[in-house]
Amino acid sequence: MTSTLLPDTLAGTTPLDAVEEISRTLEGRSPTEIIAAAQTIVGRDRLCLVSSFGTESAVLLAFAAEVDPSIPVVFLDTGWLFEETLAYRDTLAAQLGLTDVRSIHPDAERLAALDAGNDLWYSDPDACCRIRKVEPLARALSGFDGWLNGRKRYQASTRAAIAVAERDGERLKFNPLASLERAEVEAAHKRFALPPHPLEAKGFPSVGCLPCTSRVAPGEDARAGRWRGKAKTECGIHTLISAH
């Protein structure tokens, strides 16, 4: 494990055993520095980026493209996404020159067995997220030792204490934008000349699957429209540690 950002004391240490020190070392570094360090730590061919291509996805993708546009981008196409999100995926991939965007779909047999009526989102949203997002992501990550995601501490109280690097089962999860303030993200959005998600101007500051996403009123938390009226605040990919 070698990087100009990482202390010599980590030499010969496995990344999983040194995750807390890695996180402390990378705290306060720029997103591009964190992404480049992540490639060094887990290996260039063993790192991917997971993106929803939602309203706040573009900045992380732009920083990653600046480091290496060939970083594999895993996109979970649940079958319930807005058409605008699918179009946004294609727009950003083309603009940023991303060369390896992988659209991952739920297992057809699992859907037939557990959600034949396409109404599981209503009766058991946790189970719906599990078969449409958590399980497909676990399969997609099987060939990687680390992954990047775009969570930020300012997004919600449930994310206020996320570390720059975390252990996720047998791999590392990096949060390159964790410490950025909203103004910094907005400034980066302008610097990269990134287009907004088509639904943002229509009152959707956070976009997930169509049945479980609603408009947000002025003054509400940006994620207030996700699973509105339910105790659920996350789909599970960040709260359920991958087993493999």
Image (cartoon, rainbow, N blue to C red):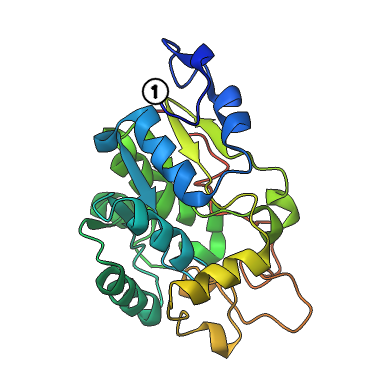
Q: Residue at x 59, y 23 (%)?
A: 21
Q: Which amino acid type is marked by label 1?
A: Thr
In depth, the one of 149 and 211 nearer the eye is 149
Residue displayed at 30% across by 77% down: 91
Q: Farthest left residue?
A: 99
Q: Quadrant of the C terminus?
A: top left
Report the side of 62 relative to 45 (left or right): right
Question: Is 54 on the left or on the right of 140, as rendered?
Answer: right
Figure quadrant of residue 112: bottom left
- Position of the N terminus, as image quadrant, is top left
Q: Can you name the residue that lies furthest to the top here?
A: 12
Determine the residue positioned at 53% across, 48% down. 236
What residue is rendered at 61% in x and 68% in y? Answer: 226
Q: Residue 52 sits in which quadrant?
A: bottom left
The x and y percentages for residue 116 are 34, 62
The residue nearer to you, when weighing 159 against 78, is 159
Q: Decide: is 65 above or below 188.
A: above
Q: Secondary structure at mark 1?
A: loop
Is any part of residue 227 visible from this angle?
Answer: no
Q: Position of residue 31 (x, y in %)?
A: 50, 50
Q: How many marks?
A: 1
Q: Position of residue 181 (x, y in %)?
A: 68, 60
Report if residue 138 is visible in the image.
yes
Query: Mark 1 — residue?
Result: 2
Quadrant in the rendering for residue 218: bottom right
Frontmost residue, 203 versus 116: 203
